[in-house]
Image: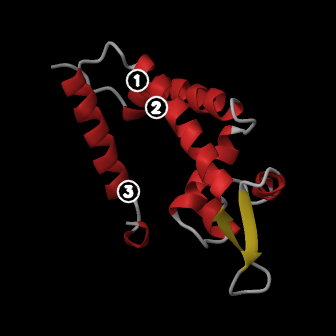
């Protein structure tokens, strides 16, 4: 009987390569990977607070402030007053949406290059399995 491999051992090499892919794609637009992630999350969930984005991304609540400031300086993201005077709702600008799309296209090109030797049917199964796993792990409020 073959010994089962831990899932982390299977996905960690891929995760490391995918982080480099995102780093490089975001850097092409003058962003960090985290700034891109914040932008993408804010676009998918307009009006959510910084605190919500921190929780969603499992990011540091102190570091997001500088990243959101930078995205604002670049004209990619706006902070608007939230329901609570201490919170800010995040909204992606038209320019921000265009930048996010360019970064995402670069990421997808690099992912396709990285996985070029994986047969298409296996790639489809991988995408579907990962999407189903992520959907299962999300809380009902996030679905």
Q: Does 97 sit above or below residue 125?
A: below
Mark 1 crowd level (few <14, some 14–19, many ≥20, 10 Å Cα): few
Judge by depth and name the residue closer to the eye, 27 or 102. 102
Q: Is residue 87 left or right of residue 122?
A: right
Q: Is residue 123 left or right of residue 94?
A: left
Structure colour scheme: secondary structure
Mark 3 crowd level (few <14, some 14–19, many ≥20, 10 Å Cα): few
Give the x, y percent position of residue 83: 68, 87
* Mark 3 vs 2: CB contact within 8 A: no
* Residue behind mark 2: 108
Q: Is residue 28 left or right of residue 21?
A: right
Judge by depth and name the residue closer to the eye, 111 or 63. 111
Residue extending furthest left? Answer: 1
Give the x, y percent position of residue 52: 61, 68
Give the x, y percent position of residue 72: 79, 57
For label 2, the SS is helix
* Mark 1 vs 2: CB contact within 8 A: yes
Q: Does 117 sit above or below residue 54?
A: above
Give the quarter of the figure containing the C terminus.
Answer: bottom left
Give the quarter of the figure containing the N terminus.
Answer: top left
* Residue behind mark 3: 137
* Residue behind mark 1: 112
1 or 3: mark nearer the eye = 1
Find the distance from the CA under tag 3 to the CA under tag 2: 23 Å
Which residue sits at x=55%, y=26%? 16
Q: Is residue 63 left or right of residue 58?
A: right
Query: Upstream in the sequence, badge 3 or badge 2?
Result: 2
* Mark 1 vs 3: CB contact within 8 A: no
For label 1, the SS is helix
């Amino acid at each position: 009987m073959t010994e089962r491999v831990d899932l982390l051992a299977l996905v960690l090499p891929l995760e490391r390569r995918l982080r480099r892919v995102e780093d490089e794609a975001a850097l092409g637009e003058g962003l960090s990977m985290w700034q891109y992630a914040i932008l993408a999350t804010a676009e998918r969930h307009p009006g959510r607070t910084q605190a919500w984005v921190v929780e969603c991304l499992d990011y540091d609540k102190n570091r997001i402030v500088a990243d959101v400031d930078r995205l604002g300086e670049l004209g990619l993201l706006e902070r608007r007053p939230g329901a609570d005077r201490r919170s800010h709702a995040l909204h992606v600008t038209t320019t921000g949406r265009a930048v996010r799309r360019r970064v995402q296209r670069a990421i997808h090109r690099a992912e396709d290059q990285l996985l070029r030797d994986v047969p298409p049917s296996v790639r489809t199964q991988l995408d579907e399995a990962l999407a189903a796993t992520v959907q299962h792990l999300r809380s009902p409020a996030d679905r």
